[in-house]
Image (cartoon, rainbow, N blue to C red):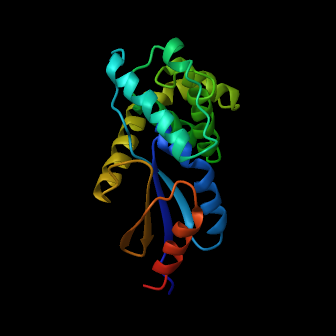
Amino acid sequence: MTATRTLIYVHDPMCSWCWGFRPTFERLCDALSGEATVVRLLGGLAADSDQPMPAELQATLQDTWRRIQQRIPGTGFNFDFWRDAKPRRSTWPACRAVIAARRLDGDAEEPMIDAIQRAYYLQARNPSDDGTLIALASQLGLDGDRFAHLLNARETHAVLAAEIAQARQMGANSFPSLRLRLGDSIWPVPVDYTDFEPMRDTVLGLFAV
């Protein structure tokens, strides 16, 4: 019997490197279509906080955005976010929004991730705020009231905690990270931000292990 082949993508919807990696990851998924199942696992970059982000951290993250644009040409960022959005170091609400969308509609996970990333990086809207997340869910056609309830429901918190724990157990402590599950074994797949082929070749090579 052929072992189950699952490519696990550990990410956070408010991880800027995940945003930059997105086009290459999509090409990787296309290249592995029919070869492996792809699942997304939320790594939970920054815990809940209602405190404004310190100015020093804001400057550091803006520098990160510029580094990403240099390393991954074509990655878009709207720097008005830092002026207009009252940033907080809090990505768990956005992670819970992905879980809530997934629970309401099994096909809504990727559209919710896309909506969060575009709101954050291109539209200077703050996905740390529940109001932003509820508005995005409604724009996707999800039931706004049900989404708002699920966003902070106990079971949603529990799912996020479980996914974070699973990511840590696999040693996925930075994002994005890739792991290949073959039966009971887990293998790391080094991330290449601009070329899907080395990752594809790594995955296909591991099939022969």
> Is residue 113 visible to us here?
yes
Residue 10 x, y percent position in the rendering: 44, 52
As rendered, which of 54 and 177 lies closer to the eye?
54
As rendered, which of 123 and 161 lies closer to the eye?
123
Could you tell whether 21 is left or right of 43 in the image? Answer: right
As rendered, which of 39 and 24 lies closer to the eye?
24
As rendered, which of 103 and 65 lies closer to the eye?
65
Residue 45 vs 5, above or below: the answer is above
For the point 52% across and 57% down, the residue is: 39
For the point 50% across and 38% down, the residue is: 13
For the point 36% across and 40% down, the residue is: 158
Residue 139 x, y percent position in the rendering: 69, 27
Residue 206 vs 121, above or below: the answer is below
Residue 154 x, y percent position in the rendering: 37, 32
Could you tell whether 112 is left or right of 43 in the image? Answer: right
Residue 59 vs 6, above or below: the answer is above
Residue 128 vs 101, above or below: the answer is above
> Is residue 49 visible to us here?
no
For the point 59% across and 44% down, the residue is: 109
Residue 82 x, y percent position in the rendering: 49, 18
* Residue occupying the far front of the picture: 70
